[in-house]
Amino acid sequence: MHPFMHMLPLALLWVVLLLPLAGSPASAETSPQSVLDGVFTQAQVGRGKNTYKRFCSDCHLTNLQGDGLEPPLTGSLFLDAWREDYLASLYDFMQTRMPKSRENEPGSLKENQYLDILAYILSENEFPSGAKELAFADLGSVMLTGHDGPAPLPSTALGRVVGCFTEEGGVFTLTNASTPSRVREADVTDEIEITKSAGNPLGSQTYALNNLEFVLKDNERGALLGQKVQAKGVINIESTPGRIHVLSLVGTGQGCGQ
């Protein structure tokens, strides 16, 4: 598995249907179920361990730390690559890209095998088991967080923010912005995502915007001023104010008072 080399897997239709919004926020107004709530069983972990050994351990090793070319599947690097996102994203990545060997092609395992492997990986990251097995229908509603619960996105993560598009002295800013939510694709959007962004309330954060000259023409930027927009890109929350390297910016069809 290559979460650090391929951070933008193509979204499948079921992800769109299952998720409130692909990569929607753990830190937004609602508190979704998370991997801290015991979303898999020990029996599932046992099956997943055996399936992992058969199909995954040659590359990721029996200790899940990878062989140097493959990234680790436990620890802070793994969690930072996938936290603040729903399990659907990780499952989608596994199902569309793994395993890859001469004997087995990506997507060649059964749905329950991928679910069992996912349960095993979560268990090896010291998340608790519970009474109910992880099912396909759960993937779009269970958030992968750190052990301390939801947290701000890691620096340089791809994210989505809704806010008011403003300009002063040639500097473009997103004001009254929402809490960033994680996304896997930042350079494209669709009508479903825009509609959901239109329904997202504004917030209290401010983000400086750069790279806009490569995303929108002068007249397109001017037409969006004073509007509620959806910005997607690389988010740096450590600067003051926060900064977004914008990869896409679209209007929601609303003024900032809406």
Image (cartoon, helix red, strand yellow):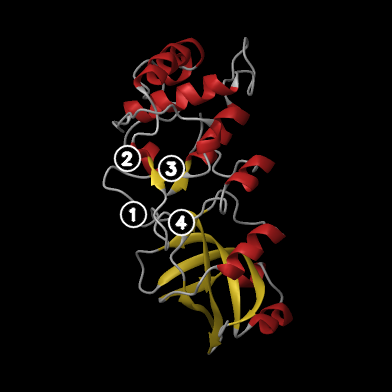
Residue type, numbered disc 2: Leu
Q: Which of 181 and 258 is in front in this view?
A: 258
Between tags 2 and 1, which lies in front? 2
Farthest residue, direction bottom: 169
Element at label 2: helix
Q: How crowded is mark 1: few (under 14 residues within 10 Å), some or many (20 or more)?
A: some
Residue type highlighted by circle 4 = Pro
Tell me where residue 77 sits by quadrant: top left
Rendered location of residue 245, percent (x, y): 52, 64
Residue plotted at (66% across, 67% down): 215
- Please report whichever mark, 3 or 1, sits nearer to the chain's N-terminal start: 3
The residue pinned by badge 3 equals 81
Give the label on residue 25, or none: 4
* Amino acid carrying mark 1 in the image: Ala
Label 3: how many Cα within 10 Å (few below 14, some 14–19, many 20+): some
**Circle 4 or circle 3, nearest the eye:** 4
Residue 104 is drawn in which quadrant?
top right
Q: Which residue is drawn at 56% across and 53% down?
A: 20
Percent position (x, y) of residue 154?
38, 53
Asked if disc 3 and disc 2 are in contact, CB closer than 8 Å, the reply is no
**What residue is shown with label 1?**
151
Which badge, 4 or 1, comes first in the chain's sequence?
Answer: 4
Mark 4 vs mark 2: give the one in front.
2
The Cα–Cα distance between marks 4 and 1, rounded to whole angstroms, is: 10 Å
